[in-house]
Amino acid sequence: MRELVGMQLFWLQILILLVLGGCNRQPVGFQLELQEATSPENRAIKGLLQQADLSRVLVGLNAAFKLPATIPVIFREGPEQAVYEDGRIIICYDFLAHLDQALQEDFTDPRIRNEILLGEAHFVLYHEVGHALVQTLDIPVVGQEEDAVDGLATVIAVSVLKRPELAIGAAVALDALEQSDEDFHQEDYWDTHSLDAQRYYNIICWVHGGAPEMCEDLVAQLVPEDWFKTRAGDCPEEFERLRRNWARLLEPHFKPGIRLLARAKRRAKEREKTR
Ligand SMILES: [Zn+2]
């Protein structure tokens, strides 16, 4: 009897060691980190970000993808706006605090400014996640990568989170930070990013295409009437192409169980169609 209890304790100890070993292993995938903020403006931004559910998509991505390394996602003070470099995503409080200033003239209600700031923070995060996925998983991109990852960020906001207002917030932020035409320099035209105004209209088009019923009134306030005559008609197809093509590019990198789930869903849909 004593021997039996001893064996059980042995296996229990092995189990505990395995669990502890697993916990101590370096985590793989996106790891969110909100660093210290020192100025009052940056502390306000950090406080806002702490209330936002920024890690939700990262947890989902970590569960879905075979990511080869740890990718720190660092919010911190600094001069960069947002960047993916040296295997890390860095997004700076200062940039969001500057955006808050830029919004104050048009949006006197701080609650609306906070909504826009949160939209921008989410969107920029998914945009940089797009760069990280493209580079770590070697995903082919034809055309400008900056435009491609704007598309992915919009798909995440509209189709995954069902929160198209996040992408609208990002578009409003681009508008608030946009230079006036006289301020353009030649380097703005050779920059890897499309002009802010082009990014603004693209994001609005994709949101309009992906969630027309949810955002019709909002979109109508953000574009001139002619936009509906000349661009809006293409938006549903543009968004659907983005959504479908990103899914096709990312699916080979899903973990095995996720792939099976995606296939099972597709097969179930096909069976429904043939009925
Ligand atoms: Zn970028």
Image (tube, grey):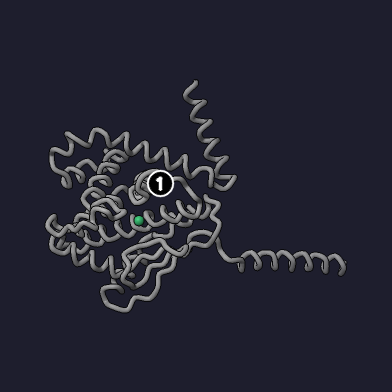
Q: Residue furthest bottom?
A: 38
Q: Nearer the viewer, residue 229 or 55?
A: 229
The residue at 36%/47% (across/down) is 148
Left or right relative to 163: residue 228: left
* Kind of residue sitting beneath label 1: Val
How far across and how far down the image is residue 122, in percent?
Answer: 34, 57
Residue 186 lies in quadrant: bottom left
Picture quadrant of ligand 1: bottom left
- Closest to the observer, 64 or 5: 64
How many numbered marks does the figure carry?
A: 1
How packed mark 1 is, by other alpha carbons closer than 10 Å (few <14, some 14-19, many 20 or more), is: few
Q: Position of residue 162 (x, y in %)?
A: 36, 46
Q: Position of residue 262 (x, y in %)?
A: 52, 39
Q: Is mark 1 within 8 Å of ligand 1?
A: no
Q: 54 or 124: nearer the eye?
A: 124
Q: Position of residue 180 (x, y in %)?
A: 14, 57
Residue in the picture at 74% in, 66% down: 14
Work out whether 252 lies above or below 234.
below
Residue 162 visible in image: no
For the point 27% across and 77% down, the residue is 40
Quarter occupied by the N terminus = bottom right
Q: Secondary structure at mark 1?
A: helix
On the image, which quarter does residue 173 sit in?
bottom left
Q: Quick check: 138 left or right of 160?
A: right
Residue matched to label 1: 160
Rendered residue at 13%/55% (across/down): 181
Quarter location, residue 58? bottom left
Is residue 129 visible in the rendered image? The answer is: yes
